[in-house]
Image (spheres, rainbow, N blue to C red):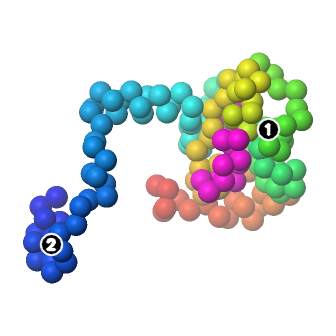
Amino acid sequence: MGHWRAVRARSTLPLMTSLVTRTPVATPEEANEHFERRLAFETDAADVARDVRMGAAEFVIVDVRSAEAFAAGHLPGAISAPGGLGTDFPDDLLVVYCWGPGCNGSQRAAARLSAQGHRVKEMLGGFEYWVREGHPVEGTAAEPLSRRADHELVG
């Protein structure tokens, strides 16, 4: 923190209001409630991969991308349900995913499925981060997709 203050003191730019703190910061209690609440709706690729690998997957993985994208590559054991439509889903928890963070298809599908009475979580990062983290992929393009893992980026 001290480094940035020192840099700011030498700057010739006019003092500006922080965009980060322009909206008041939540109390630690409010922040805890918010982040705990988010965990009720979201999971991530690493947690899904761990549960699948350990045999602890007490959920059904639902790929809501197009049938063509699913055929090219998908999470092992996932079912294809473009847009979250057209499948008789079990009563299990559904973990939905789309392409990646720039796609809200999984959110739309989660909204649709939860409105039908299903328990749903969205897998943050979607298929993109599943691949980037180097998790196994099934489908016609599984081999080239597996080469896209970026372990240096994701740690």
Mark earlier in primary sequence (1, 2) = 2
Which residue is at a point 48% across and 62% down the rendered structure image? 152
Determine the secondary structure under disc 1. helix
Q: Which residue is mark 2?
A: 7
| Horizontal side of residue 114 vs 17, given as left or right | right
Which residue is at a point 88% across and 32% down the rendered structure image? 87
Location of residue 120 with respect to 12 vertically, above or below: above
Magenta stretch: includes residue 97: yes
State which quadrant residue 91 falls in: top right
The kind of residue on which mark 1 rests is Gly
Q: Nearer the viewer, residue 102 or 52?
A: 102
State which quadrant residue 121 falls in: top right
The kind of residue on which mark 2 rests is Val
Q: Is residue 145 visible?
A: yes
Q: Bounds of the magenta span?
A: 93-108
Q: Which residue is mark 1?
A: 84
Which residue is at a point 23% across and 61% down the rendered structure image? 17
At label 2, counting other C-alpha atoms closer than 10 Å, the crowd grade (few under 14, some 14-19, many 20 or more) is few
Magenta stretch: includes residue 35: no
State which quadrant residue 1 falls in: bottom left
